[in-house]
């Protein structure tokens, strides 16, 4: 078996599935990206040129950059903060369960829930949205949370993503935090370090690899974010993101060439984050 080809019998089903559902579609998408809208005329790099110059795509790239910075920073930092703070409370399991609960909701469901929260009615009419009802009760004018471009509506959408994913970050970082030897923390406190110094010089260095993995995971999600935007605004009012634009080009405008080019761009953008995750994983396995 070691010298022959018998081991390929065990690998064949997995390799066949990967080839049919992953390798072939990837290669086919790359090929189509060099053709026109109906895939019957070779256009070279025209689709990629349009992807990086068309106004809708530039707006989508800008919004993905906003998501990348704000969403990643908030989810990882708040998740880390909650992991450290909730480790000290009496009802840790209940508190963490409540914070993690949004992960049990689909992104479409989360979008529907928050769309009701952000619902806007003109001033002087009854407000059925929670936020505008609160704003009205405080004596202010209602805000069009999903139509005020370009910052308010994008930040409103990012808030939904943060609400869903912070619990995930908290759980992963909490598991790593519990792996820190208590003797290290106590020794730092005995040496005169305050809680901030313990957090900065002991906790963060120990969790550095886990923070990197969680951060790259959030980056991968941000680059392919679609559900929340599609349900809440469908890219209207300058909230377009790259993945949502790809879906529009494919199924709404029937421009298969441009849609494939956008898919390839997303694929290339995600590869570095995946490579970093794999290297971190291998490094951790080597240490073990």
Image (cartoon, rainbow, N blue to C red):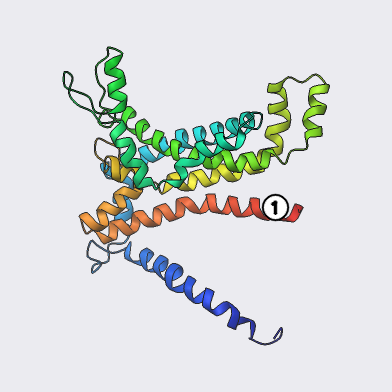
Which residue shows up at 29% across the image and 49% down it? 245
Above or below residue 244? Residue 28 is: below
Give the quarter of the figure containing the C terminus.
bottom right
Q: In the visual, does 82 lie left or right of 254?
A: right
Say if 167 sits above or below 139 in the image: below
Residue at disc 1, secondary structure: helix
Residue 60 visible in the snapshot? no
| x, y percent for residue 212 | 60, 42
Left/right of residue 259 with respect to residue 200 in the rendered view: left
In percent of the image, x 70 and y 35: which residue is there?
Answer: 205
130 left or right, relative to 175: left
Q: Residue at x 33, y 27 (%)?
A: 152
Percent coordinates x, y for residue 56 in the rendering? 27, 43
Q: Is residue 92 visible?
A: yes
Question: Is 238 or 12 nearer to us in this picture?
Answer: 12
Assess disc 1: are there few (<14), some (14-19) or many (≥20) residues with their C-alpha within 10 Å of its C-alpha.
Answer: few
Residue at which label 1 appears: 283
* Quadrant location, the N terminus: bottom right
Q: Which residue is drawn at the image coordinates 32% and 25% (left, top)?
A: 131
* Residue 7 sits in quarter: bottom right
Count the marks: how many? Answer: 1
Query: Could you say which is closer to the camera, residue 181 or residue 199?
Result: 181
Hey, which residue is sitting farthest top in the picture?
139
| Residue 73: image location, x then y, percent | 51, 33
């Amino acid at each position: 078996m070691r010298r022959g080809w018998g081991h390929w019998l065990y690998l064949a089903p997995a390799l066949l599935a990967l080839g049919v559902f992953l390798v072939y579609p990837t290669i086919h998408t790359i090929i189509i990206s060099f053709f026109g809208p109906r895939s019957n005329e070779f256009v070279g790099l025209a689709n990629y040129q349009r992807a990086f110059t068309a106004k809708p795509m530039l707006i989508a790239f800008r919004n993905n950059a906003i998501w990348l910075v704000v969403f990643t920073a908030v989810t990882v930092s708040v998740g880390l903060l909650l992991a450290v703070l909730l480790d000290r409370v009496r009802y840790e399991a209940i508190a963490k369960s409540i914070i993690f609960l949004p992960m049990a909701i689909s992104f479409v469901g989360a979008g529907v829930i928050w769309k009701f929260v952000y619902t806007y009615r003109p001033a002087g009419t009854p407000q059925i949205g929670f936020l505008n009802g609160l704003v009205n009760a405080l004596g202010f004018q209602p805000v069009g949370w999903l139509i005020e471009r370009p910052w308010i509506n994008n930040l409103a959408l990012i808030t939904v993503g943060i609400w869903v994913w912070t619990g995930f970050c908290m759980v992963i970082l909490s598991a790593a935090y519990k792996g820190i030897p208590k003797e290290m923390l106590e020794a730092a406190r005995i040496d005169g370090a305050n809680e901030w110094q313990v957090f900065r010089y002991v906790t963060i260095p120990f969790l550095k690899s886990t923070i990197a993995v969680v951060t790259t995971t959030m980056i991968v999600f941000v680059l392919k974010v679609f559900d929340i935007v599609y349900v809440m605004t469908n890219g209207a009012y300058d909230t377009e993101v790259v993945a949502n634009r790809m879906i529009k080009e494919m199924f709404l405008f029937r421009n298969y060439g441009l849609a494939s080019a956008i898919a390839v761009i997303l694929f290339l953008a995600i590869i570095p984050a995946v490579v970093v995750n794999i290297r971190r994983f291998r490094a951790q396995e080597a240490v073990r």
